[in-house]
């Protein structure tokens, strides 16, 4: 039993963190006119070139052959740097393509030529996800050539954007992501995977939780740095218990989500009975941690935290978007309470 | 990263499970003091005879000399079997004993460690004072050297089970001129020493295990100082490095058992409108959140043990786990009253346990360092925020 990254796993984290800090610093998102289409195909291909999109995929499918644990560690860093959720779409989309034996799509996804975008079902229409797909979906980062990945607890489906009917474009709460509403009228999916074949939905929920943890940690780090430097009443505001104790609570939220993320990555990967239970608990706590930490970070940064001159608002907004992917807090809590507790 | 146990560890788990099933007491522990003491000592004697006392204590002092993982497995199986809690044995097994192992001299170890494991003695702790609570290092109980003895005058408070204890780990000020952390000594004191007066304090949950203890010229041999004179602050910190994070396993499992029992209660309790409590959205939401946090508590405990195993030093997880678990337990207790409904007023009958849990839960966020002190420690030592 060892619930910490091995040396090799830590190397993956360190390499990812330094690559992202150099190539995709969060500060670049603050430059004026950056817009919601900043993440280009070249960016995606650059990341694909690192092997990240197939890190958890077996080598027989041209993946790196690591486990869900390495995927999770990587997605914490991606979340911390506000990289787009379509990277998660690519990782899961590659899995579906591999399971379906769709070698062409698999190669295109792993090379970063095809983007796989994610969507959340709107609840005002009946939703069906499986061999056939119906419903109204909010799609992030949709581009003409993209594949769309839709999943619920029963199944996951991959289909071309053209299979859905464009309804209307919308402004996204997160200015770094485009958003449009599309409708599926019950046509067939390109490929679909039932949950019994592969737990795409639960893997998605776990990896979104990892991204949420990245947000919780990034906003804690920024708050601590600011509380050490910012002086009021002749001393750093971090010396006041009202601020210090907020930061302590933020750090416990990070610790509790990180520990459960590690635990869940093992129980789900190894198909242990506790896997789904761990993921239900994890997603609920991760949503809470990201939202509470990001929101608290605004307060700790005071007036500056409320502006777009600092990056805190981007974390607040991204936390809201990620909360809607692969099951809401309410969904996961309902499932958790209905399950029986593992030994 | 893995959750695997070796075949040897799994076999050890089976042995622990089988032995506990066959040997754990058939009857519950009496709440009353003297009978409680007899029960606790008898159970410790049974553990010792079975070869299960002091799993990670050195063999030469009666321990089993096993490693952290065996300690972890033992504690998990122990809590799972619902064997009796530590109660009066707590201090000797978890605080005084480990401190003597870490800092005591050979004579102190030989004299004091075996009787703890053999179930012959109960220990208590004299740390806090009326004017030294969260600011423990400002303690003022004086100890003056007189020949080969210390002469102690002052008072201690919050000493659990003092009137049922044989020995006490006592912090005294031996150098009033030194800075406040530097002039303290950690000494072993007999509880039947002349010049002591012990006054029980009735707590809000109805217990009388807390005490105030007064010292008027109490004489303690110099050889009872552990870790050297004026070195007591460092000695009292040393016990932290002994447990290696496994100390939180019992509380973690107790929290799990409590939330699961509360969920079971919510399934069989009817609300005013006839629905089951668990079918109420507000109650269900809170139960699920507490269940999620409790699951995380397990993972945090395992991660803390892993961190300690690697570094050999306790990290921030001690303060984090203490704060997280005690606050979580308090929220469970408050929700329990909501589920019990009007019967929360009953301190007798089938649901009496829950108002008792509620009243007792206040102790956890105060004793052993308040939640506020824990947040200071996390903020300052772990996050590096200024004092």
Image: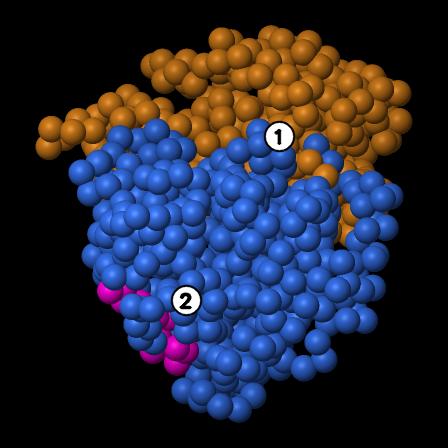
Chain colours: A orange, B blue
The residue under the point 30% across, 48% down is B147
**Chain identity of mark 2:** B
Q: Position of residue B302 (x, y in %)?
A: 63, 44
Which element is circle 2 on? loop
The magenta-colored residue range is B202-216
Which element is circle 1 on? helix
The residue under the point 41% across, 13% down is A28
Marks 2 & 1 on one chain: yes
In the displayed orientation, state which residue is furthest to the bottom. B349
Location of residue B243 by image quarter: top right
Picture quarter with the N terminus of chain B: top right
Sequence order check: which comes first, mark 2 or mark 1? Answer: 2
Residue B205 inside the magenta-drawn segment: yes
In the image, taking residue A265 as reference, residue B177 lies left or right, namely left
In the displayed orientation, state which residue is furthest to the left. A233
In the image, taking residue A339 as reference, residue A215 lies left or right, namely left
Front residue of B236/B168: it is B168
- Res. B310 mark: 1
Instruction: For the residues labelled 2 and 1, say whether their Cβ atoms are less than 8 Å apart.
Output: no
Location of residue B195 by image quarter: bottom left
Q: Can you identify the residue that label 2 sits on? A: B191
Q: Is residue A255 above or below residue A25?
A: below
């Amino acid at each position: 039993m060892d619930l910490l990254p091995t040396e090799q796993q830590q190397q993956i984290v360190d390499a990812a963190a330094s690559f992202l800090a150099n190539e995709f610093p969060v500060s670049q998102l603050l430059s004026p006119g950056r817009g919601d289409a900043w993440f280009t195909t070249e960016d995606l291909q650059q990341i694909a070139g690192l092997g990240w999109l197939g890190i958890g995929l077996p080598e027989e499918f041209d993946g790196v052959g690591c486990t869900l644990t390495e995927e999770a560690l990587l997605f914490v860093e991606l979340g911390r740097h506000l990289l787009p959720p379509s990277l998660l779409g690519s990782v899961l989309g590659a899995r579906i393509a591999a399971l379906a034996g769709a070698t062409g799509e698999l190669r295109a996804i792993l090379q970063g030529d095809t983007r796989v975008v994610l969507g959340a079902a709107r609840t005002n229409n009946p939703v069906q996800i499986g061999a056939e797909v119906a419903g109204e979906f909010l799609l992030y980062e949709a581009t003409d050539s993209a594949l769309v990945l839709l999943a619920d607890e029963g199944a996951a489906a991959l289909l071309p954007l053209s299979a859905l009917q464009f309804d209307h474009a919308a402004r996204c709460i997160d200015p770094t992501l485009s958003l449009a509403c599309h409708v599926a009228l019950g046509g067939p999916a390109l490929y679909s995977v039932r949950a019994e074949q592969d737990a795409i939905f639960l893997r998605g929920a776990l990896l979104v939780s990892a991204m949420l943890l990245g947000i919780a940690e990034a906003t804690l780090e920024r708050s601590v740095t600011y509380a050490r430097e910012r002086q009021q009443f002749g001393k750093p505001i971090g010396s006041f218990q009202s601020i210090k104790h907020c930061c302590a609570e933020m750090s416990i939220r990070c610790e509790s989500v990180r520990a459960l993320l590690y635990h869940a990555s093992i129980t789900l990967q190894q198909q242990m009975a506790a896997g789904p239970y761990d993921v239900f608990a994890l997603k609920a706590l991760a949503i809470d941690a990201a939202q509470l930490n990001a929101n608290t970070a605004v307060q700790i940064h005071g007036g500056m935290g409320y502006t777009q001159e600092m990056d805190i608002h981007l974390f607040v907004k991204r936390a809201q978007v990620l909360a809607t992917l692969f099951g809401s807090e309410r969904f996961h809590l309902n499932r958790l309470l209905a399950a029986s507790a593992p030994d | 990263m893995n959750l695997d146990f070796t075949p040897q560890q799994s076999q050890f788990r089976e042995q622990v499970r089988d032995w506990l099933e066959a040997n754990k007491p058939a009857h519950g522990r009496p709440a009353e003091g003297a009978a409680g003491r007899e029960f606790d000592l008898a159970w410790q004697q049974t553990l010792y005879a079975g070869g299960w006392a002091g799993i990670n204590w050195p063999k030469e002092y009666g321990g089993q000399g096993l490693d952290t993982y065996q300690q972890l497995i033992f504690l998990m199986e122990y809590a799972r079997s619902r064997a009796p809690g530590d109660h009066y044995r707590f201090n000797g097994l978890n605080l005084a004993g480990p401190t003597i192992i870490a800092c005591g001299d050979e004579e102190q170890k030989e004299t004091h460690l075996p009787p703890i494991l053999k179930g012959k003695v109960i220990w208590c702790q004299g740390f806090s004072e009326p004017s030294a609570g969260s600011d423990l290092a400002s303690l003022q109980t004086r100890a003056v050297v007189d020949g080969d003895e210390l002469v102690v005058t002052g008072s201690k408070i919050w000493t659990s089970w003092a009137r049922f204890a044989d020995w006490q780990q006592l912090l005294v000020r031996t150098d009033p001129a030194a800075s406040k952390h530097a002039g303290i000594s950690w000494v072993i004191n007999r509880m039947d020493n002349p010049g002591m007066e012990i006054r029980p304090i009735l707590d809000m949950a109805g217990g009388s295990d807390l005490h105030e203890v007064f010292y008027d010229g109490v004489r303690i041999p110099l050889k009872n100082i552990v870790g050297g004179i004026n070195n007591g602050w460092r000695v009292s910190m040393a016990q932290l490095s002994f447990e290696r994070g496994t100390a939180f396993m019992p509380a973690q499992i107790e929290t799990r058992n409590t939330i699961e029992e509360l969920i079971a209660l919510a399934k069989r309790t009817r609300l005013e409108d006839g629905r089951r409590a668990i079918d109420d959205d507000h109650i269900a939401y809170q139960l699920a959140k507490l269940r999620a946090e409790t699951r995380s508590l397990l993972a945090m405990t395992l991660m803390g043990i892993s961190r300690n195993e690697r570094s050999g030093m306790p990290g921030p997880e001690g303060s984090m786990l203490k704060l997280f678990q005690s606050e979580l337990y308090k929220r469970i207790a408050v929700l329990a009253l909501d589920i019990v409904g009007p019967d929360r007023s009953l301190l007798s009958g089938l649901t009496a346990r829950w108002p008792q849990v509620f009243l007792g839960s206040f102790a956890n966020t105060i004793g052993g360092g308040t939640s506020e002190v824990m947040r200071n420690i996390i903020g300052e030592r772990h996050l590096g925020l200024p004092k």
